[in-house]
Image: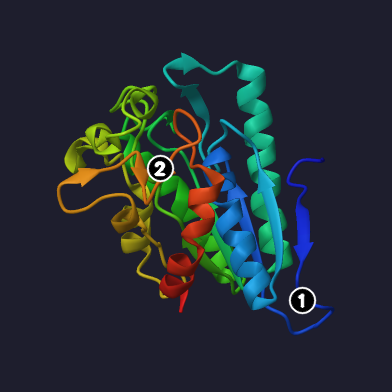
């Protein structure tokens, strides 16, 4: 795949008026793929996907991932991919673009020394404005609650008959949310973040298993089965 290249799934049946969408970002965009594909099938979308794991789609250099410094060559590769991906979406002018980024563990550095949430918001705004100016609605999907940094990854295996024991306090599980800050600052009706937090947490706790299904696939990614179950709820937030 070339920089910014994409995979395309066409559920439009050849309809030239079909709605078009993109899902872009790092692996925290990719873990929503099951939900987006489910919606695309139901709504006859033509949808494109472009991801690069460990690479936040922001107009700012990535410096570390999970507290490990990113190799300069990998950082440059990330930057090149990001610029190409942003341009590809801008050129295609889809009806909407879904974005996912693991801001909790991907440290960026724009040289300002500002807090991470501020740097992320500034970087998002620069990219999102290009898409909005081209006529696209931007739909940032707010990250699910944290997993490995707030609970033992073996918790469900150790508590198979009592999965509720793996719940953690909501205030502990919720990670940073620069998406909302960026959207509020832009003040555009064409930037509409969606949050599915209520399907991971109640008012007090966030869970590792819900309805007999494991929420997470690994340390920080959603289980595809659970993501697919969230498709109707994501669709409701879009309508």
Q: Nearer the viewer, residue 101 or 227?
A: 227
Q: Secondary structure under badge 1?
A: loop
Query: Measured from the top left, where is residue 236 in percent x and y?
Result: 43, 74
Q: Image quadrant of residue 176?
A: top left
Q: Which of 43 and 214 is in front in this view?
A: 214
Q: Which residue is drawn at 56% across and 46% down?
A: 224
Q: Secondary structure under badge 2?
A: helix
Which of the two labelled residues, at mark 2 and mark 1, occupies the earlier sequence position? Answer: 1
Query: Measured from the top left, where is residue 146 in percent x and y?
Result: 34, 36
Question: Is mark 2 in CB contact (under 8 Å) with mark 1?
Answer: no
Q: In this view, does 20 lie to the left or right of 102?
A: right
Classify 10 Å Cα crowding around label 1: few (below 14), some (14-19), many (20 and above).
some
Q: Residue at x 55, y 18 (%)?
A: 70
Q: Residue at x 40, y 52 (%)?
A: 142
- Reading the image, the residue beneath label 2 is 120
Q: Residue furthest front?
A: 161
Q: Residue furthest left?
A: 204
Residue 191 visible to the viewer = no
């Amino acid at each position: 795949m070339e920089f910014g290249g994409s995979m395309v799934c066409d559920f439009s049946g050849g309809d030239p008026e079909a709605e078009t969408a993109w899902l872009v970002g790092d692996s925290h965009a990719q873990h929503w793929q099951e939900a987006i594909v489910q919606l695309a099938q139901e709504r006859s979308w033509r949808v494109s996907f472009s991801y690069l794991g460990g690479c936040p789609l922001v107009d700012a250099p990535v410096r570390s991932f999970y507290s490990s410094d990113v190799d300069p060559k990998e950082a440059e590769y990330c930057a090149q991919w990001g610029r190409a991906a942003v341009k590809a979406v801008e050129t295609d002018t889809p009806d909407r673009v879904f974005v996912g980024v693991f801001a909790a563990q991907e440290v960026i550095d724009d040289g300002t020394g500002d807090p991470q949430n501020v740097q992320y918001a500034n970087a998002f705004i620069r990219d999102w404005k290009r898409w909005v100016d081209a006529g696209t609605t931007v739909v940032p999907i707010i990250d699910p609650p944290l997993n490995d940094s707030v609970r033992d990854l073996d918790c469900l295996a150790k508590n198979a008959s009592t999965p509720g024991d793996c719940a953690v306090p909501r205030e502990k599980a919720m990670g940073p949310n620069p998406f909302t800050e960026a959207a509020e600052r832009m003040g555009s009706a064409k930037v509409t973040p969606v949050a599915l937090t209520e399907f991971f947490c109640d008012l007090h706790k966030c869970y590792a298993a819900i309805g007999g299904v494991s929420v997470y696939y690994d340390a920080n990614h959603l289980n595809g089965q659970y993501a697919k179950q969230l498709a109707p709820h994501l669709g409701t937030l879009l309508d």
